[in-house]
Image (cartoon, rainbow, N blue to C red):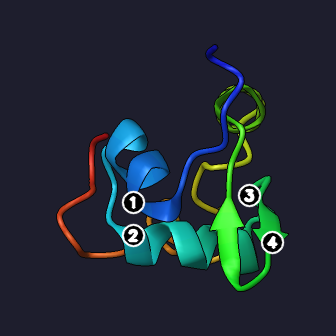
Amino acid sequence: MEDRWLSVAKIAAYLGIKQDTVYKWIANKRMPAHKVGRLWKFRKEEVDEWVKSGSAKPACAGGPHADRESDGDEGR
């Protein structure tokens, strides 16, 4: 029964990032997410594919670290 929906907290823990980063990626990087009522839910397989496609990488416009947050998530 691996076909379940993950919460923001669970997907953040799975990716090793902060929950704030998840919300930023939904808004700015088109992270695959589904709004259920007022909650965001995620399919692990969709997020894995999105990460593999390179969509989670920082933008190059302002340099290699332009889109990176300074919240301790660097290098993950």
Residue of label 2: 19
Closer to viewer: mark 3 or mark 4: 4
Question: Which residue is situated farthest in the bottom direction here?
Answer: 38
Q: Residue furthest top?
A: 1
In this view of the protein, which residue sits in the foreground, 25 or 66? 25
Which residue in the protein does label 1 denote? 9
Query: Which residue in the protein does label 4 denote?
Result: 35
Mark closer to the chain start, 2 or 4 = 2
Q: CA distance from mark 1 to mark 3?
A: 15 Å
Element at label 3: loop
Residue 43 visible somewhere in the drawing? yes
The quadrant of the image that shows the C terminus is top left
Give yes or no for contact between labels 1 and 2 (Cβ–Cβ under 8 Å).
Answer: yes
Q: Image quadrant of residue 68?
A: bottom left
State left or right for residue 68 relative to residue 54: left
Mark nearer the N terminus (1 vs 4): 1
How crowded pointer 4 is (Cα within 10 Å; few <14, some 14-19, many 20+) is rated as few
| Residue mark closest to the camera, 2 vs 4 | 4
Cα separation between marks 1 and 2: 6 Å
Q: Nearer the viewer, residue 38 or 19?
A: 38
Q: Which residue is depicted at the point 71% across and 23% down?
A: 3
* Numbered mark located on residue 31 in the image: 3
Q: Secondary structure at mark 1?
A: helix
Q: Amino acid at mark 4?
A: Lys
19 shown above or below 20:
above
Quadrant containing the N terminus is top right
Q: Residues within 10 Å of mark 1 (few under 14, many from 20)?
A: some
